[in-house]
Image (cartoon, grey):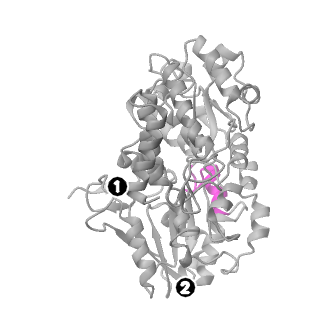
Amino acid sequence: MKKVIASVLSVAMVAAIAAGCNDTKPTATETQPGTEPVETSDGETTAETEPTETEKETMTLGTGSEHINLWSFTNEVPNMVNKYISLHPEFGEKYTVDVTIIATTNGAYQPALDAALAAGGQDAPDLYTAEAAFVLKYTQGSASQFAATYKELGIDVDAKIKEAAIAPYTIDIGSRNGEVVGLGYQATGGAMIYRASIAQEVFGTDDPAKIEEIFGSGSQSWDKFWEAADKLKAAGYPIVSGDGDIWHSVENSASSGWVVDGQLNIAPEREAFLDMSKKLHDEGLSNLSSDWQPAWFADMNGTSEHNAFCFFGPAWLLNYSMHDNVGGNFADGEGTNGDWRVCAPPVGFYWGGTYLIANKDTDNKEGVKEFIEWVTLDSSDTGLQYFWANGTMVDGEVGTKDCVSSGTVMAKSNGEVEICGGQNIFPAFIKGNEYASGKCMTEYDEKINSYWRDAVNMYSNGECDRDAAIAQFTQNVNDNLSF
């Protein structure tokens, strides 16, 4: 059987390929440059949602007599354990961290994790990770009863959150009945990522502050976006590559979730996406591309017939997906590297992220608490998030500078990146994190989103009318989820 190295592609990319549809829910970004890859599958990855067997990799970190079981769907958090042991060798002398990695790309992770949590005992996970697409199941939903509150671990949560200026939307997502049970380390609040050269040509400026004014950043309104779209169209530029570029902004800024009091609910903001997608399609305001497809990447590297002006996404979209597809340096006439800028979006949203959760029945509460606090709430210069933000996970190397959940850390970190012509991207993403909300999520979002995107595509492509699209969506949800 062929071995698949999960860290070759960003996890976001792998998830997108496996999902096979426009609506993908990326996880945290790929391993920081310089870390060692870990094989996470014994066979080819597939698009199956019900795997026939669980494929996993295991390893042990540390040499201590006390054991902590860590379950994850990538090697990202295990690599953090290695980093923590290098900084705190006494942790590795006291604990052995037994790692189980099961990739999400073949649908195996959640069923295996659920079974291990339900079985309990010494082999149960003490610490486990969950991705934004399904994290509510473990923080607020059907599997949330296994989670310990951070306060129960002995963490001074309220004080640490305030000190670190943790992104509010992550607290929304990670709280059960007002108590934090899971937090992330990477912030995935979104920004508007735009072409500086096109901005100069059409708007007479590429200054992020000026572009924010033109687009109504933080207004929670799309009015100025459509005004700008008309100006861009007149100059020959579609505002976005495809409707997927604004979908996550719409999805995660809704006033209510897909399920309310046990019934399917279509928030007005999400229903409006039908008309937004149709407008982009009928008025020639996009290139009609689909996420993760060649035409989408062509707009990143500037090889479309009519290059799109902007994308909407978190830092991982810029740092990994776009960075790997810009096609050369804009100044040399080879691609778009250096020609991108970021500013706060008109409507706040987030896209993806990984959360750390502790088992309430762990026998090693002290060790679990120590590691979780270092990863999710430590805003010092020796906390995980400072290394992550500054690309210094590996001593002596500067890797990818990624956004983190601590606004305190980003405010004191160097966010200057080459792809954006040396712009410090962190201020825009700090605003994006502040604008985002996690209050419209449900544990059923991943499936319901896919049915909604199918219905929207049918409508925008002229295959059915608006009412028929909604009826088809409602029927699909009812048939498959009984709502």
Residue visible at 55% across and 85% down? 361
Residue visible at 42% across and 67% down? 110
Mark 2 highlights which residue?
361
Magenta residues (range): 383-397
- Asked whether 386 falls inside the magenta stretch, the response is yes
Q: Nearer the viewer, residue 295 or 41?
A: 295
The spot of residue 393 in percent (x, y) is 57, 57
Q: Is residue 432 visible?
A: yes
Q: Nearer the viewer, residue 192 or 325?
A: 192
Amino acid on which disc 1 is placed: Ile
If you read the primary sequence from the N terminus, does the residue marked by circle 2 or circle 1 appear first? 1
- Asked whether 228 falls inside the magenta stretch, the response is no
Calculate the distance from the C-alpha at mark 2 to the C-alpha at mark 1.
33 Å
The spot of residue 391 in percent (x, y) is 59, 50
Residue visible at 63% across and 23% down? 196
Disc 1 on helix, strand or loop? strand
Where's the N terminus, which quadrant?
bottom left
Observer-side mark, 2 or 1, equals 2
Amino acid on which disc 2 is placed: Asp
The spot of residue 432 in percent (x, y) is 69, 44
Residue 482 is marked as none
Q: Nearer the viewer, residue 426 or 275?
A: 275
Say if 276 sits above or below 105 in the image: above
Q: Is residue 324 visible?
A: no
Disc 2 on helix, strand or loop? loop
* Residue reaching furthest to the left: 1
Residue 5 is marked as 1
Residue visible at 72% across and 61% down? 379
Say if 127 sits above or below 5 in the image: below
Quarter assignment of residue 221: top right
Q: Are marks 2 and 1 in contact (CB under 8 Å)?
A: no
The spot of residue 92 in percent (x, y) is 54, 78
